[in-house]
């Protein structure tokens, strides 16, 4: 019984993201997984939400282990992309804005 091409693609993606016989480091080194991780870390324009929607459509929703891994992965990446990276960018913007200026420049200019 031949499988549909969409099912083969979903099986291939599930094996790349949640393999049963590979370590975390072998998974992290695959170029597709690196691209997915970068997409999940971009909090601009809903790119991270689209990446998680893609993973939600790919995963086998009858498997509780995959569902738990998806939820934990989603929360972890949202913590880093929405919380930690935004806090670092806010701190960097503050330091650039209110940091020490040159002697010829008086006052501060946070107009941007």
Image (tube, rainbow, N blue to C red):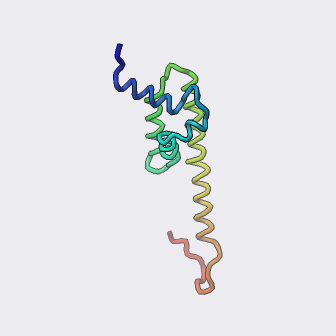
Instruction: Identify the residue at horizontal 34%, vertical 16% (top origin).
Output: 2
Quadrant housing residue 78: top right
Question: Which residue is at the far bottom?
Answer: 104
Residue 88 as seen in the image, left or right of residue 52: right
> How many numbered circles are shown?
0
Residue 42 as seen in the image, left or right of residue 72: left
Residue 62 x/y as whole percent: 50, 19
Relative to residue 102, is residue 60 depicted above or below?
Answer: above
Residue 112 x/y as whole percent: 50, 69
Relative to residue 93, is residue 65 depicted above or below?
Answer: above
Relative to residue 70, is residue 90 depicted above or below?
Answer: below
Residue 50 x/y as whole percent: 43, 40
Residue 79 x/y as whole percent: 60, 44
Quadrant housing residue 19: top right
Instruction: Identify the residue at horizontal 36%, vertical 19% (top origin).
Output: 3
Q: Nearer the viewer, residue 40 or 21?
A: 21
Instruction: Identify the residue at horizontal 56%, vertical 40% (top origin).
Output: 28
Quadrant housing residue 74: top right
Residue 88 as seen in the image, left or right of residue 56: right
Relative to residue 11, is residue 105 depicted above or below?
Answer: below
Q: Nearer the viewer, residue 72 or 109?
A: 72
Question: Which residue is at the far top?
Answer: 1
Instruction: Identify the residue at horizontal 48%, vertical 23% (top origin).
Output: 60
Q: State which quarter of the image contains the N terminus.
A: top left
């Amino acid at each position: 019984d031949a499988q549909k091409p969409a099912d083969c693609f979903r099986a291939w993606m599930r094996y790349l993201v949640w393999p049963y016989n590979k370590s975390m480091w072998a998974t992290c080194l695959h170029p597709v997984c690196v691209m997915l991780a970068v997409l999940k870390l971009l909090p601009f324009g809903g790119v991270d939400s689209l990446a998680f929607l893609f993973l939600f459509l790919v995963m086998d929703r009858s498997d509780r282990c995959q569902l738990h891994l998806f939820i934990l992965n989603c929360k972890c990446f949202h913590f880093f992309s929405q919380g930690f990276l935004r806090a670092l960018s806010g701190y960097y913007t503050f330091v650039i804005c209110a940091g020490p200026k040159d002697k010829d420049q008086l006052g501060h200019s946070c107009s941007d």
